[in-house]
Image (tube, coloured by chain):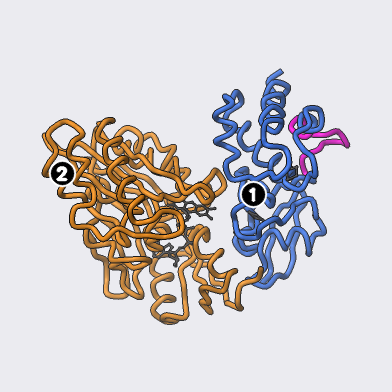
Amino acid sequence: MEINLSVNGSQVARDVTPMTTLSDFLREHLSLTGTHIGCDTSSCGACTVTMDGKAVKSCTVLAVQANGSEIITIEGLSENGSLHPVQEAFKEHHGLQCGFCTPGMVMTAVDILQNNPNPTEQEIRHGLEGNFCRCTGYHNIVKSVQHAAQSLNA
Amino acid sequence: MIPAKFDYIKATSIDQAISLLSQHGYEAKILAGGHSLLPAMKLRLNRPSVLIDIGGIDALGSITDEGDAIKAGANCTHYEIANSNLVKSHVNVLSQTARVIGDVQVRYRGTIGGSLAHADPASDYPAAILATDATISVRGSNGARDISATEFFQGIFTTALGEDEIITSIRFPKTANGTYVKFFQSASRFAVVGCAAVKNGNGIRVGITGVADTPYRASAVEQAYDGTTSAADHAIDGVDVMSDHFASEEYRAHLAKVFVRRALEQL
Ligand SMILES: Cc1cc2nc3c(=O)[nH]c(=O)nc-3n(C[C@H](O)[C@H](O)[C@H](O)COP(=O)(O)OP(=O)(O)OC[C@H]3O[C@@H](n4cnc5c(N)ncnc54)[C@H](O)[C@@H]3O)c2cc1C
Ligand code: FES
Ligand code: FES
């Protein structure tokens, strides 16, 4: 099936089978391998991208369901070669170790801050419920999101 | 993981979805948010050969004030329900329920119609559906009908929905005072036990999910209610309590009483 969608601001048209997940589409068809596949069963959140501005687990969306939508992946966050404030905060505050969960964490954090520019620690933890990290113990991730909120509001 | 081969059809109207469903019979499945169906298909627990996507049908997507009730279209996402001002002011128990389903990403995609049709015994909505005495409106090739909350749920993954019927909307009578409390499965966040309670005149209505293979109205609690929390002891009267790797029968029975008590405390 032919699908047309916007990915990181560029219009793309591709022929996909209905069985193709959005995560496979991004990685295999568009070579955007920043979107990671952890569990492939909608549990871990590593594959999170935004679809029409909302964080979704791309392993549990069919590419054909994303037809006509606007997708932003981790590759689409930086502008003119400078990191997005959320990425900058993760780097600065050790919000990652192995980095596997990071693209999903960052995309979900971007969604949280869009809806709630001044989240409490509790709201950040609640917002990140669908994203698992096996390295950091979460504290520095939460701290990174808090700092990102400050710099986005500055 | 890749699901077994299927054809995908994007339906543009309710009528088209129903006619496709009757045309393809049991080979076909409705696709709404996909957050129960797609994981099951990837695990090959489910192998429909045709998926009928109702996600783009606008007529299934709104929340409206119907005077004495709030009507939610089947395609309303958990996120939309949790954040709707109409739902917050008139059926607060539903808003509280939607807010604790899964995680942010699941709430953006998953729909109330999909959740009810799927009828996972650990799903959250059934408690609120029963406690508010909601009505489920469905449509099929034989026309439209309404199904009461108590008739809708029939067992594990089993409902009163006919083969070629789809849920179109759910009607919630306005209820001022209500609450939903839940004991989360530690990994998936589904409900090991979930209890919704609402004031109903001088009495209460109580819906319980997660405890038995079918969600139920806790009539024994409702009858014993005397304004205190002692009625919670009747949470599982006459109920066959489930046992699984999340909670043994004994533990679940205990949790049911604790969570009914907590709900009553908040009324
Ligand atoms: C990680 C994760 C955590 C979750 N946690 C929870 C939780 O805590 N609590 C909870 O309650 N749920 C939870 N869920 C399930 C989630 O709420 C699903 O969104 C919901 O059960 C199904 O809705 P859907 O729109 O995604 O339906 P789909 O997956 O698209 O469909 C589910 C079933 O319903 C049928 N269907 C869909 N719409 C209709 C309709 N209008 N009429 C007739 N049949 C229809 C489909 O054919 C299919 O059989 C979780 C899911 C995931 C992936
Ligand atoms: S890979 Fe999609 S949620 Fe884990
Ligand atoms: S940094 Fe390794 S999983 Fe999160």
Query: Horizontal placement of B110 versus B139: left or right?
Result: right
What residue did someone put label 2 on? B222
Q: Which chain is blue?
A: A
Q: Residue at x 32, y 39 (%)?
A: B93
Q: Residue furthest right?
A: A81
Q: Which chain is orange?
A: B
Q: Magenta span has A85?
A: yes
**Chain bearing mark 2:** B
Is the C-beta of the residue carrying label 1 under 8 Å from the nearest atom of ligand 2? yes
Query: Horizontal placement of B228 versus B136: left or right?
Result: left
Q: Secondary structure at mark 1?
A: loop
Q: Main secondary structure of the magenta part?
A: loop
- Residue A44 in percent (x, y) is at 63, 51
Q: Is A41 above or below relative to B265?
A: below
What residue did someone put label 1 on? A45
Contact, CB < 8 Å: mark 1 with mark 2? no
Residue type, label 2: Glu
Query: Horizontal placement of B164 versus B101: left or right?
Result: left
Magenta residues span: A76-87
Q: Residue at x 34, y 36 (%)?
A: B86
